[in-house]
Image (cartoon, coloured by chain):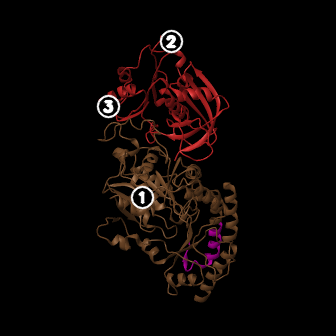
Chain colours: A red, B brown
Amino acid sequence: MSTISKATVLSIKEYGSDIREYLLKLDKNYYFEAGSFLLLTLDVRDSYSRWPESRNFSIASAYNKEGTIKLIIRRVGEYTGRIFNELLVGSKCVVKYSFGDFLLPFIDKKSPICCIAGGTGIAPILSFCEQLKSETQSERLHIFYSFKNEEELLGLKILEKTVSNGFLHLFCTRKSMEGTINRRIAWNDIQDEILDCSSSHYYICGGEDFTSYFKDNLINVGAENIYTDEW
Amino acid sequence: MDRSKILELVKLYYAEQFAQAEFEPGKTAIPFAGRIFDEEELVNLVDASLDFWLTTGRYAEDFEAKFAEEMQQKSCMLVNSGSSANLLAVSALTSPLLKGNRLKKGDEVITVAAGFPTTVNPIVQNGLIPVFVDVELNTFNVKVSEIEGAISDKTKAIVLAHTLGNPYNLDAVKAITDKYGLYLIEDCCDAVGSTYNGKMVGTFGDIATTSFYPAHHITMGEGGSVLTSNPLLKRIITSLRDWGRDCYCDPGCDNTCGRRFKGKYGDLPLGYDHKYVYSHVGYNLKVTDMQAAIGLAQLKKLPRFIEMRKENFKKLYTGLKKYEEYLILPDATPNSDPSWFGFPFNVRENTKFTRKDLAEYLEANKILTRQLFAGNLTKQPAYMDKEINFRIASSLENTDYIMRNTIFIGVYPGIDDVRMDYIISVFDKFFNNIR
């Protein structure tokens, strides 16, 4: 069963006007798998009743004993607008965690892990980075990450610290930017990485069209371990 | 009305209703097990009932998280009994989500016949074949030297209970499961708190199970749990427990994934409600929050309960050591620290008395006894049925010896020093009479 916990906002980092990285401290801190997601509600309640209106977000950090978690939230509608207005440093919300199947392989500790992320879809991949780094397995990681512009480039420090040279591929779609490719990720980019698709694990996180494009191509070449997280 | 007032009254009720009766030697029964509780269990029970949430709720949420930590596992799924826990553990290994590693009908699972039936029954219930190997007389656990000889090309798993709290040789068993790529299920129903090489039992295998029936280390009336650190097995077990559904919404929640009407599953139409998509042929084996509420109060007492069981075991062992001429006393498996469920021993086959004589004497003196559950399961009526397929890999000589000669008595925390002294004095009288 999931855990319901109050959470306090420790810090907020702005990435342009519509994306924020929240650092929260959980009142109840229990283990969760990297890649999990949670539900966040602004309705702070004490009684156990039907779960109120909430939104789900991938956890952008791995479990730690300090009980802190990172969330990357894009303002896209009324509720996320409320989050931006009401969830300030020091304020509280309630989260329910953890859920999802977008998780690292449990048994296979050797095969490559190839992550393909678009925009805020990098969030669960950042938790993979932390987890694999703590398990000294980050050399397995290959990351393809596309974002609109420099302002919306999330988690660059973690990515650069974690991913081996030549395995981090950054795509800036709306601007020309040093160290990045100025276009969307294409299927050829994944093929050029020359991974054994029958043993590698592919994680795709982004919008529906984005995930289905890569998923379909991977299926066509016989990839067996495909995990998707789409919105 | 203020709920706290009701709960204060519950405390008063506990004090009045459950005051401990004075022990009268020879008149007051000393059971082999029993529930030990105080006002906190009653308060939690009433508190949960006043929530009227009824199904799995806030107490279950707390219990699962805390018990998983206690058992050094990443996840715990509460179920309505230890037997259900075993059913889910074995059924999980047949899940299609395990792809080529799933167990299929006719696959073999190595186990023992000396134990509780519902360790083995789920193997049969899933169309798998139990393969029985013999046990040791002093630990009551599997003879590890016989396991490899029982392995065939159909062997896919080992399912074993830590008998009466005594861990089996996990170094040896784990070496075999690793060598042959077998799953390991640890039935810890009688072994909550037992450790091996300093680690909790249940953490060595793929899945562990526990029971919270009143006779066990902690209780919630009816109850049990399945524990695993493997997230895929957790997903499968939860699905099987909750009707087989694919969705992972908690009770009372909808659309946790945010894609409730967006998916395509099986041959169902696109957008079919994910809440009613079933990826397993499942059960409903959940607990109510009232049960979990009792369990949460019990969990706080668990460390003390474990210590008391260990202390009582030592006292009995010391008190009965002088009768080793007649009794085979239990030995803890090397490298283990058992949280004993009971104190088992074998009556050596002799000309002066039988197990029946001793058991009847103890029972007449109000010391309640039990045999090692099914004895030799293959000789039970249920397993005489020709429709039940199993294989006996080697002689079950010791299993038969246990069937004929084992008794166990209690070490549970309700046995205080006065009761313990009385138990030993009854043994003394018995052996004085036969000499």
Q: Local crowd at mark 3 within 10 Å, few (<14), some, or many (≥20)?
A: few
What x and y, as percent, mark residue B278? 37, 47
Between discs 3 and 2, the one toward the N terminus: 2
Viewer-side residue, B215 vs B3? B3
Vertical comparison of A92 with B316: above or below: above
Q: Label 2 belongs to which residue?
A: A178
Q: Secondary structure at mark 1?
A: helix
Q: Residue at x 47, y 27 (%)?
A: A121
Q: Nearer the viewer, mark 2 or mark 1?
A: 1
Q: Local crowd at mark 2 within 10 Å, few (<14), some, or many (≥20)?
A: few
Q: Label 1 belongs to which residue?
A: B87
> Tag on residue A219?
3
> Tag on residue A207?
none
Work out how far the residue at label 3 is from the one at label 2, CA to CA, in angstroms: 33 Å
Q: Local crowd at mark 1 within 10 Å, few (<14), some, or many (≥20)?
A: many
Residue B25 visible in image? yes
Name the chain under label 2: A
* Main SS of residues in magenta: helix
Asked which quadrant contains residue A158, the reply is: top right
Asked which quadrant contains residue A12, the reply is: top right
Q: Secondary structure at mark 3?
A: helix
Vertical comparison of B201 with A27: above or below: below
Task: Report the residue that reaches farthest toward the top.
Answer: A176
The image quadrant where one finds the N terminus of chain B is bottom right
Same chain for the residues under marks 3 and 2 in the image: yes
* Region in magenta: B311-329
